[in-house]
Amino acid sequence: MADTTVDARNLQCPMPVVKTAMAINEITSGQTLELIATDRGALSDIPAWAKDTGNSLKEQFEENDEYHFIIEKA
Amino acid sequence: MTVPELQEETAAEETAPEKEKMVLVAASGDLDKAWPVLILATTGAAYGMDVTIFFTFWGLSILKKPGTGITGDDWRQKMMSAFHKGTPDGLHLSKLHFAGLGPSMMKSLADDKNVASVQELLDLSIQLGVKLWPCQMTMDLMGLTNDDLIDGLDKPAGAGSAISLMKDASIQLFV
């Protein structure tokens, strides 16, 4: 279970990345965040954002047409 | 504050890595240009970048306060503001404008698809600390005062300030 969840379902670009970034500022290093999105752009945007900001994408899966990303704060 | 505390603070300032900079020049008041400018700005901020948008020429229309009527003192300024009202909700489409029918179709489509509006993205930009610089020369040219523009803006600036920022920025885009 992640420490915090970001529900970005039905939101379009750039909201999944922006909401994730805002939520990651609220947690501490080592804590995890789960993002749930339906924007297909997030499939490439979230891994790119995680790589560039140094946060690590621990897990990514699809469930009922929803994309889940587990990110650990650097 | 004691000397060791001061030293510690200075050291912390020195070790904090300087944020990468992104500078966007918003020169268009078209809805289809304002949208990508603000999407890139908010995303840049989400990347932890120090983002500045320099609004010049018609780009200033994005910053006009909702409800702003005819602006300027000169008849030419007044006429221009009458034909191009601006404000986040009053922007034109560069193609298929059809006297406003195009933008309302585009906005209702965006609403259906849950795309954030220009107004929402502008509010979000301010919330994320994106710096919004109106161009002083264009304000003078068009007769716009600080009262015609939304709150939360930085001080009006010129090309010199824009170049000074862009020189050291890793992303500079003219939209």
Image (tube, grey):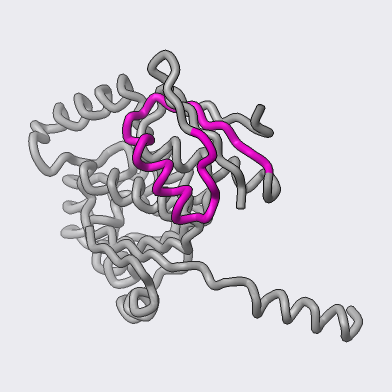
Task: Name which residue lies at 32% across and 49% down.
Answer: B62
Rendering coords of residue A72 (x, y %) = 60, 43
Residue B7 drawn above or below residue A29:
below
Residue A41 drawn above or below residue A62:
below
Instruction: Check the image and name the residue furthest to the top.
Output: A64
Instruction: Please state if B168 lies on the left or on the right of B82 as rendered.
Output: right
Question: Is residue B143 in sight in this rendering?
Answer: no
Instruction: Please state if B175 lies on the left or on the right of B163 as rendered.
Output: left
Count of numbered tags: 0
Q: Quadrant of the C terminus of chain B?
A: bottom left
Q: In front here: B174 or B91?
A: B174
Residue B112 drawn above or below residue A44:
above
Q: Quadrant of the N terminus of chain B?
A: bottom right
Rendering coords of residue B104 (x, y %) = 22, 27
Task: Name which residue lies at 30% across and 77% down.
Answer: B159
Rendering coords of residue B29 (x, y %) = 23, 50
Is residue A38 within the magenta segment? yes
Instruction: Please state if B25 lies on the left or on the right of B79 as rendered.
Output: right
Q: Quadrant of residue A47?
A: top left
Is residue A20 within the magenta segment? no
Task: Name which residue lies at 52% across and 55% down.
Answer: A54
For the record, the magenta segment spans A31-59
Q: In front here: B48 or B34?
A: B48
Question: Is residue B28 in sight in this rendering?
Answer: yes
Q: In front here: B47 or B143?
A: B47
Instruction: Check the image and name the residue furthest to the right.
Output: B2
Task: Name which residue lies at 44% across and 51% down.
Answer: B150
Q: Quadrant of residue B9?
A: bottom right
Instruction: Please state if A62 lies on the left or on the right of B98 as rendered.
Output: right
